[in-house]
Image (cartoon, grey):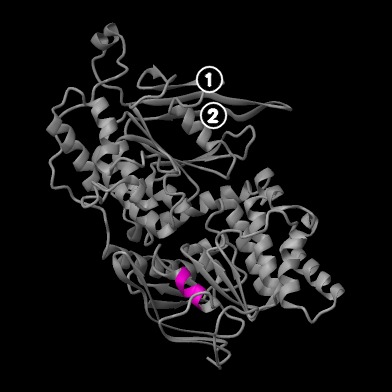
Amino acid sequence: MDQPILSLTGVTKSYVGSGGTSQVLAGIDLEVAEGEFVAILGFSGAGKTTLISAIAGLVEPDGGEILLKGTPIDGPDKERGLVFQSYSLFPWLTVEQNVALAVDAVHKDRSKADRAALVKQKVELVGLGHAMDRKPAQLSGGMRQRVAVARALAMEPEILLLDEPLSALDALTRAKLQDEIERIRKEEGRTILLVTNDVDEALLLADRVAVLTPAPAARIGAIYEVDVARPRDREAVNDDPAYQRLRKDIVSYLGSLNAESSSVGESGVALPNVTPLDLAPPPQAYREAAQSPVERRYLEFYKLDKIYPTPKGPLKVVDDFNLIMDKGEFISLIGHSGCGKSTVLTMAAGLNAISGGGIVLENREISVAGPDKAVVFQAPSLMPWLTARQNVALGVERVYPHAGKSERRDIVDYYLDRVGLRDSKDKMAAEMSNGMRQRVGIARAFALSPRLLLLDEPFGMLDSLTRWDLQDVLVETWNRTKVTAIMVTHDVDEAILLADRVVMMTNGPNATIGKVLKVDLPRPRDRKALLDTTEFYHYRQEVLHFLAEYDHGPAAKAA
């Protein structure tokens, strides 16, 4: 490498808190060439944001050296444009005014006309020329993040620093912003440093991928050259052997790092041999006539419709949704934002009124919510003033009133152990991370021994590497229970890893089932092993192709 534009040598950083000193970075070494795109990939809490903040001059390292063109960095400067995960826009200013604020601050030596032209050029570069006069409240999340990118570019920095700028966006909007970043890289030839937790995002955009080891005391554990030809189409690269090989190498390496601190737990508690109380039993005559439990057509969606009233008239969100599931089957429901996936799920849970058709579970029509239908939402809906054990016990006490107190406690402890919370059972929910709270939610759902498990993007608020850990928790626990399950997700790999069938929905309104893919892969499934199978990439290609076909409509335009 010629003289690097950016050089980091032995960079360290620690923070002092009530629990003592925590070392975040333990000697970061990295060189970045001019015009290069480097992605920094790592686990949640590994110090990625601390690292990029140090490069931006917002955080002072304890030791080591950061050089920009051979000169030590000393505080923030216009040579380093930073885009945060949150939009950080002034809500009372228009798009033009938000960008102009940065331009006027760093380009005081230019004429008013030149500054206005620069603002217009950068706003148009990110595709918002039509929205110059709009305020942030009138923009979608994706559009707001484009304003933040335009503002950083308008400073004309030597290096563009992107701190997980797309992680808060839905999958479709995220894909469109990835395309925008690639276009900016190509047109501007700017040096870019991207912090991300998404392997595919790193491989689509970067020239090199640097992987941080987990906290504490993070270092750069490995650096990968992305030898995949540009332009990189997210659907086409799926069939590229170089992409497959590199993706497998990075995922395997991350998996090995994750395995060292894996929290899929064994339980020291034996699960009591008790069955939950049936809080909605069928009539006595039916129970007497029944000779065997229902196995086939265990759950049936029949001509399911959902209509919402609007000021402009009725809006049909879900139209003629038909699906039959056998007992113990796991379905992944996938599609773009706004296609009605969560609406179908909440109707199945009895939480949302059905406008037309019906849903039948074990020969009983669903009309109300109940513990026989356990739901895990995207936001971990726990009582913050209760401990993990108390949150799970709320449901267990209702469905196991006939069990002894010690048996109910064993049920609670068993599932908290299984989701990796053996040492955190008495921790208050308010004191837990999002990942820990979601583990409690999963434990609570399984502890109810429900007839139907409904998962509404349960890992959507988590970084993709923490998702892996909780996917393992879910897979391991589901393998034991074989509960009938439906999971709404945006994640193609997650859908294939978990499901017997992937049900793909068309865009809304009037959304329905567009395609059903049977996943004929042996169980139990291992993420690393799947990457060695050609079938996995064939399934992945089918889902990606379907999503690409429906990459249009209101959701796409709003991005």
The residue singled out by tag 1 in the image is: 357
Q: Give how far across and how far down residue 110 sits, in percent.
A: 81, 80
Q: Label 1: how many residues lie within 10 Å, few (<14), some (14-19) or many (20+)? A: some
Please report whichever mark, 2 or 1, sits nearer to the chain's N-terminal start: 2
Q: Secondary structure at mark 2?
A: strand
Give whichever of 402, 557 is nearer the camera.
402
Q: Secondary structure at mark 1?
A: strand
Q: Are marks 2 and 1 in contact (CB under 8 Å)?
A: yes
* Identity, as a three-letter code, of the amino acid under mark 1: Gly
The residue singled out by tag 2 in the image is: 321
- Can residue 273 be seen in this snapshot? no
Q: Label 2: how many residues lie within 10 Å, few (<14), some (14-19) or many (20+)? A: many
Please give left or right for residue 109 compared with residue 377 in the image.
right
* Identity, as a three-letter code, of the amino acid under mark 2: Phe
Give whichever of 501, 151 is nearer the camera.
151
Q: Which residue is painted at 47% across and 31% down in the image?
A: 346
Figure quadrant of residue 386: top left
Please give left or right for residue 116 compared with residue 18 in the image.
right
Q: Which residue is painted at 59% across and 71% down in the image?
A: 82
- Distance (Cα) linking label 2 and label 1: 9 Å
- The part of the chain drawn in magenta is 49-54
